[in-house]
Image (cartoon, grey):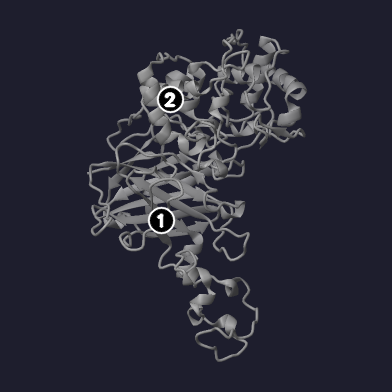
Amino acid sequence: MSDSKPATEVSSVWPIAIVALVLGVLIGGTVAKWNQSSPSVTESGKPTKSPAEDPGKVEEGRIEAMPATPALITKGRELFAVNCATCHGTDGDGRGQAAYLLDPKPRDLTAGLFRLVSTKNMVAQPEDTYRAITFGMPGSSMPPWDRLSEEDRWALVHYVRSLALKQAKAPELIEPGPEPAADAQSVVRGRQLFLTNCAACHGQFGRGDGGQKQVTSDGYPIRPRDLTLGIFKGSSEGKQLYYRIRGGIPGSPMPATETLSDENLWHVVHYVKSLSGPGAEALNRQRYQTLAATRRAHAELPDDPQDPTWQKLPGTYLALMPLWWRNNRIPGLIVRAAHDETDLVVHVSWEDEKSDDQQIHLDSFPDGAAIQLTTVPDLPSFAMGAAGSADLRVWLWKASFQKDTAVAYQDVQAVNPNMHVPSYPFMAKAPADPFGAHLASLDSHDPQFLTARGLGNPVSKPHEGAVESMTAHGFGTLAHRPLADKGVRARGAWDRGVYSVVFRRPLKQEGEGGLSLKLGDTVHVAFAAWDGGAGDRNGQKCVTIWQALKLEQ
């Protein structure tokens, strides 16, 4: 499919999504997948258009390289500083501020070992780098940059390649031989060759569970790709898989393959493609899309996230990528947005097999979701913005916040209700029962002995609501916003493996630091989700890239 197609809309979503999100392998057949090839349509029935030029021509290999010029390289340096340096570092050495949060680690671009190559000697062509920037690197935290213009992407290509001073060899192009029919006989022959040549790393059934331990050229441990998930560097298009197998993946343990004939290599390609069903790649690939916040009556936007009224609004599926990559991740979420001329309301839902709603133990973390919003036209980094840019607004909902407010503040006695401790001498108000200190509220304790609360740490005190409003203007600058965003509310619910959360925010905000939104404007939003049961917390989470949000008049 072409990744240029805009937002896919779903009306009755979870019966479809549950089928779509079951990624597995059936030898001799494929599992049904949610194919996102259908374009979204407006209420008038007309397909919406992608804001970027059609990346489909990249998918089909028709790339017209833009020549490098000093002006283009200078522009690339400026774009790199805004969009790439947070992860790759200001010098491109892979040591950006966010690098410690990421796995796999960001590439050291100065080494010249670009992952995607279409050559025999592992020397990337400009077209290979353009593809990596356009589509990102699925299976890592490298996002696609298809929202940038074609010229901007070529500017990045030439600047990034200028960093790789060690790249001196001329490329030796791979020329794939004629592709045989992708029939059952070819798939069977491909499996035989796969078992001989690939299973030691990728496992007998391609699940990435082979016995060999592997590291990158930088010395970091890495896991072989689980080929059943349909997540491929480059793409799952046949010729791109041929390049990955024949040319290898520089900087990784994936070697070049020289012993297979063209015909046999195509058989392996056909088998690898059979391991994941149609639509699997679309389900996992991030894309820049335009979401619509439609005008609705107030009654059509209930606070209850499980109200069936929400299913009447069209939903847009957004793929998520974990910053610390793992296969048991949240693959994506579904977003519905609307307004009633007073409030902007966003409904977010995703799958999570278990609800985690407390964080009392050191190794327990709550589930959560967040929305990041900016109104500036020149988008900063989606990783919390950039220094010197206008503040981003961040709204964080946590299942633990909601339990604190809806049930009772969850402290140690909430998970250990039968514990007994003697009275503390520093309690401000002694309990009637000298052995009932565990029943006293936190307000009974001298805050000097509750260090975080005594310092006013907003995380350590009972929350006033289920959502926390914050600002950010660069990596590591997230700050609590105590007053101006008090109008932001959120309510979540979990039922039978599905979370749903409704975020509600006034369109107009007054007072110092208030940010008003105007009907007819287009703002940008990004989303994040945390699976506490998988160890997600703080910067270890699953995120989307920026998405346009049109506030319909």
Q: CA distance from mark 2 to mark 1?
A: 31 Å
Amino acid type at mark 2: Leu
Residue 311 versus residue 64 in the image, above or below: below
CB under 8 Å between discs 2 and 1? no
**Percent of width and height locating residue 316:** 41, 41
Residue furthest bottom in the image = 432
Q: Secondary structure at mark 2?
A: helix
**Percent of width and height locating residue 433:** 59, 90
Q: Circle 2 is placed at which residue position?
A: 156
Q: Are there few (<14), some (14-19), or many (20+) residues within 10 Å of tag 1?
A: few
Amino acid type at mark 1: Ala
**Is 241 placed left or right of 206 in the picture?**
left
**Percent of width and height locating residue 457:** 46, 65
**Is 285 placed left or right of 230 in the picture?**
left
**Percent of width and height locating residue 28:** 68, 27
- Please say whether residue 72 is visible from this viewpoint: yes
Residue 537 versus residue 464 in the image, above or below: above
| Residue pictured at 23% horizontal, 58% vertical | 510
Q: Earlier in the sequence, mark 2 or mark 1?
A: 2
Question: Nearest the camera: 5 or 391?
Answer: 391
Total labels drawn: 2
Residue 342 versus residue 283 in the image, above or below: below
Residue 257 versus residue 367 in the image, above or below: above
**Disc number placed over residue 479 in the picture, else none:** 1
- Please say whether residue 183 is visible from this viewpoint: no
The quadrant in which residue 243 appears is top right
